[in-house]
Structure formats: C-alpha cells, structure tokens
Amino acid sequence: IVVTRGATAVDDEDITDLPATGVTGLIRVAQTENPGRIVLADIPTGTDINTTAILATGEPQLALRHGTFHTPRLTPVRSDDDGTQVRWDEGTILITGATGTLGAVLARHLVTEHHAKHLLLLSRRGAQAPGATELGTELTALGADVTITACDVTDK
C-alpha cells in the first residue's frame, strides 16, 4: 500500500499536495506493470491508516473521505443537469499528440461521428510532422477548421 495525503481530489476538493500527484502518476505506472500488487490510497492528514479496510476494497486506487472510500471510474458522457447534450460542435477541441496514430484517429472520430468543427492539433513538430499536412487537409475536407501547431506539452 502506498499512501498519499492530499494528492487526490474527490468531487470539488482541491489537491493540497501537488508534489505527491507526481508520486501517484509513478505508482499508477507501476500498477500497470504489476497488476494486483500495489494499492494507492489517498488518506486525509490526521487519519489512521487501516490497511485491512483498504485491502478489503479490492480496489487498486482509492481515496478515503469522511469514512467513505472513493474510487476512480470512467463514465459515459451524459446530458447536463438541464437536459442539454454535450456539444462537440461548439468551441475548440484541443488534441495533444495529434499527428501520431492515436491522435489522428481521435481527430477523425470527433469530426465524423461528433461533428467537431474546430480542432487545435498539437504535436512536437506541428505541421512538419510526417502526415500532418495530409491529416489537416483530410479533416478540413470533412468540414472542420483545423489548426496544427508545434508544441511540446512536456516542456515547462
């Protein structure tokens, strides 16, 4: 069990230990490489660590808040509280790593299936990346306004 305090936000909380979020990222990678061997638990400061309760959840990642364990889950996009659907055709969609295989597949999917109109495609080499010009031309022909920009998102 790897315990952090304040590295995970639940609901509307703020993260209170920003450096510990880096640790959680490293632990998640280690979990991927060693399934079932590592548990990541975010526990509030001043709370005792109950290893039995943590392990009994069977979850690889969790956060304890007010006596309740919370676990991360991916959920389908649903309509807003007022009943409106998420609009992919409004605003600009930013895709990082966009000129790579997965980024290009995602961009095509957003344009063809969700009618995305404005895409900002980032990659380290921008329009100089192999296939970037062709991707931009293809997406434009499908009706999207496409901007391809060189940007290394890992560079501080």
Image (cartoon, rainbow, N blue to C red):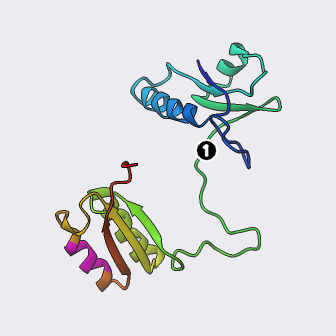
Q: Position of residue 130 (x, y in %)?
A: 16, 63
Outermost residue, right side: 66
Q: Position of residue 4 (x, y in %)?
A: 62, 26
Residue 4 belongs to magenta span: no
- At a point 66% along the width and 41% down the height, the residue shown is 15
Seen in the picture, residue 150 relative to 143 is either above or below; the reply is: above
- At a point 51% along the width and 29% down the height, the residue shown is 23
Q: Position of residue 11 (x, y in %)?
A: 73, 47
Q: Which image quadrant is residue 148 in?
A: bottom left
Q: Can you identify the residue that label 1 sits on?
A: 73
Q: Which image quadrant is residue 120 in?
A: bottom left
Seen in the picture, residue 90 relative to 41 is either above or below; the reply is: below
Q: Which residues are magenta?
A: 133-139
Judging depth in this view, the residue of 116 and 25 nearest the camera is 25
Q: Position of residue 99 (x, y in %)?
A: 27, 62
Residue 137 belongs to magenta span: yes
Neighbours of disc 1 within 10 Å: few (<14), some (14-19), many (20+):
few
